[in-house]
Image (tube, helix red, strand yellow):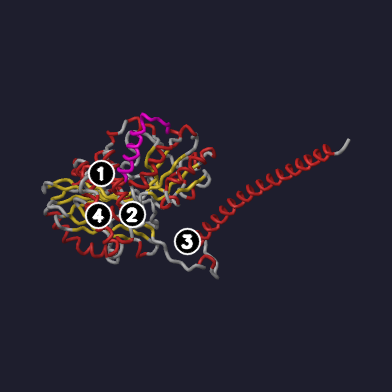
């Protein structure tokens, strides 16, 4: 989120937020409350981050932010965003695979793919197509609030028949008006030259706040933004992902980004309980760190006993771990931090703390999952929290692994109505999905501060060190940049030669004309 969440609240921003809310109430809600969905209005009143998003996107000009809120809320009601579900969209749209979420860019932002060759302009289906895009955006905004998207237009094998300017303008407006601060960047890949004119028009729609986010890349340049592990083979990548429906891709945000593959399923997890400690990572998120057999929990006696036994262990585990500064306020648990866990290369930066606070009147069962189970240890990874109590969860890197911007954590929680003896794993099997609270956390990698000349210092760089790797990366970037400059220079020289040739031809023609005129004027 914004820096305001990480430090003391900026008083000026607080005033702007309150002014925006008050003016919206006075100027927009007085005689036109039916224009908006009451759920959106209620969220605007309670969610500071939402108001701040509109203000930031409109450079803190309250009048502009209010206009954006008005347009956005009217659109949300028109398309029924708060009630839009998978069943609201024609099934054939999901089956085409023209739009979907999958993978991450190098900055850890989710990728929103548009396969342009699969889009055909059709006035009969344009409304459903717009709802289809809105469905994906709304789904993502609820699952990972505050986390931006990178939009990828895959233009390979596309032509003029695939360009629907009305639809493109709608997509632009989704990020320009309806979802503030949602766009990380928009990458146009492998665009045919014949479409240059169309995209020049698109640039005028983006506006100054978004124009810098538009990137054009060839197949050879796309890896500047996205690693090969998330690129399809036709872009030079190694991603084996093939779209199919059902189910929706990335439904559980458990993309296989490591050698061990994705997080195992619920049943596989239970079958692997009791394996050696080397495999007792987040794959076994139903186990406690010491239990071998399925854990039977008496939610009164067991929690009191574990509280006494774990006091010393918790104090040792959390010693030296940084306290989170932000909080996500969920209906069952307040989760700190709100959005991301920060890891670094120093020993003191290899542990993070997640604090869960139970805000209900019942016990709440929780578990923590991750997309990279072999990298992290989580203690405890699964347990329950008493009413009004809090639980400290330590997430630590192990085995020499480094955190990645693509790594994700999922905190799941469900309220327990009965306090009798029950198997925790069985509870998670039986609890309806509608009663499970989910909150996702991304990874932030702390950059170690190095002297400006450290890569070119007096002493030699030892092989295998980070300095050597950084130097290699820097040299590779210089070589790639040099190659691009050479290509551009060659192109310029070619154009120059062509122009010189044309000038010479014109000179010859001019001389011929002068000769003919002179000949015509001579007396016979």
- For the point 50% across and 60% down, which residue is it? 470
- The mark nearer the N terminus, 4 or 2, is 4
| Residue range corresponding to the magenta coloring | 119-140
Residue designated by label 1: 270
Residue 282: within the magenta?
A: no
Chief SS of the magenta region = helix
- The mark nearer the N terminus, 3 or 2, is 2
Q: Is residue 169 left or right of residue 409?
A: right
Looking at the rendered image, the quarter that the C terminus falls into is: top right
Assign a secondary structure to mark 4.
helix
Assign a secondary structure to mark 2.
strand
Which mark, residue 376?
Answer: 2
Q: Is residue 355 above or below residue 161?
A: below
Which mark, residue 23?
Answer: 4
Residue designated by label 3: 466
Q: Of circles 1 and 3, which is in front?
A: 3
Residue 339 x %, y %: 30, 55
Q: CA distance from mark 3 to mark 4?
A: 53 Å
Q: CA distance from mark 4 to mark 2?
A: 47 Å
Q: Is residue 340 left or right of residue 304?
A: right
Q: Is residue 237 visible?
A: no
In the image, 59 versus 324, the foreground residue is: 59
Q: Are marks 2 and 1 in contact (CB under 8 Å)?
A: no
Q: Is residue 353 above or below residue 32?
A: below
Q: Is residue 476 left or right of residue 4?
A: right
Name the residue at the bottom extreme. 458
Residue 332 x %, y %: 19, 51
Q: CA distance from mark 3 to mark 2?
A: 21 Å
Q: CA distance from mark 2 to mark 1?
A: 19 Å
Q: Is residue 188 left or right of residue 285?
A: right
Q: Of circles 4 and 2, which is in front?
A: 4
Q: CA distance from mark 4 to mark 1?
A: 54 Å
């Amino acid at each position: 989120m914004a820096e305001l969440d990480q430090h003391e609240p900026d008083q000026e921003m607080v005033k702007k937020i309150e002014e925006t809310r008050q003016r919206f109430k006075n100027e927009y809600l007085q005689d036109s409350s039916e224009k908006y969905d009451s759920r959106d209005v209620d969220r605007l009143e309670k969610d500071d981050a939402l108001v701040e998003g509109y203000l930031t996107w409109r450079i803190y000009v309250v009048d502009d932010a209010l206009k954006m809120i008005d347009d956005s809320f009217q659109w949300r009601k028109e398309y029924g965003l708060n009630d839009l579900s998978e069943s609201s969209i024609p099934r054939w749209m999901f089956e085409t695979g023209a739009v979907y979420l999958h993978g991450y860019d190098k900055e850890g932002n989710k990728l929103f793919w548009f396969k342009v060759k699969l889009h055909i302009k059709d006035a009969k289906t344009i409304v459903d197509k717009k709802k289809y895009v809105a469905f994906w955006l709304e789904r993502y905004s609820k699952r990972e609030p505050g986390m931006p998207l990178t939009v990828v237009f895959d233009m390979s094998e596309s032509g003029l028949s695939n360009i629907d300017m009305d639809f493109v303008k709608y997509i632009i407006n989704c990020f320009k008006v309806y979802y503030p601060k949602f766009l990380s960047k928009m990458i146009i890949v492998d665009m045919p030259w014949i479409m240059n004119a169309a995209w020049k028009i698109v640039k005028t729609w983006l506006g100054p706040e978004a124009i810098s986010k538009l990137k054009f890349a060839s197949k050879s340049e796309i890896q500047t933004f996205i690693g090969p592990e998330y690129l399809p083979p036709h872009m030079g990548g190694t991603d084996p992902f093939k779209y199919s429906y059902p189910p929706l891709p990335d439904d559980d945000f458990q993309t296989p980004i490591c050698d061990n593959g994705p997080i195992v399923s619920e049943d596989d997890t239970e079958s692997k309980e009791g394996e050696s400690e080397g495999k007792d990572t987040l794959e076994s998120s139903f186990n406690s760190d010491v239990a071998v057999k399925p854990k039977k929990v008496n939610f009164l006696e067991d929690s009191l006993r574990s509280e006494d036994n774990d006091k010393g262990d918790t104090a040792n585990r959390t010693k030296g771990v940084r306290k989170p500064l932000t909080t996500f306020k969920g209906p069952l648990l307040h989760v700190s931090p709100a959005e991301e866990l920060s890891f670094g290369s120093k020993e003191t930066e290899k542990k993070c703390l997640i604090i869960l606070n139970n805000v209900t009147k019942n016990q709440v069962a929780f578990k923590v999952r991750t997309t990279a189970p072999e990298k992290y240890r989580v203690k405890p990874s699964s347990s329950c929290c008493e009413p009004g109590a809090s639980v400290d969860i330590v997430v630590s890197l192990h085995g020499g692994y480094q955190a990645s911007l693509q790594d994700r954590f999922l905190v799941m929680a469900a309220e327990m109505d009965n306090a009798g003896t029950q198997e925790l794993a069985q509870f998670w099997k039986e609890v309806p999905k509608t009663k499970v609270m989910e909150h996702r956390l991304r990874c932030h990698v702390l950059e170690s501060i190095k002297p400006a000349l450290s890569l070119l210092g007096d002493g030699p760089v030892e092989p295998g060190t980070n300095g050597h790797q950084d130097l290699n990366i820097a040299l590779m970037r210089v070589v790639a940049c040099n190659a691009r400059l050479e290509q551009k220079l060659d192109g310029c020289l070619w154009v120059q030669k062509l122009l010189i040739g044309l000038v010479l031809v014109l000179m010859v023609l001019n001389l011929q004309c002068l000769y003919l005129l002179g000949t015509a004027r001579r007396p016979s």
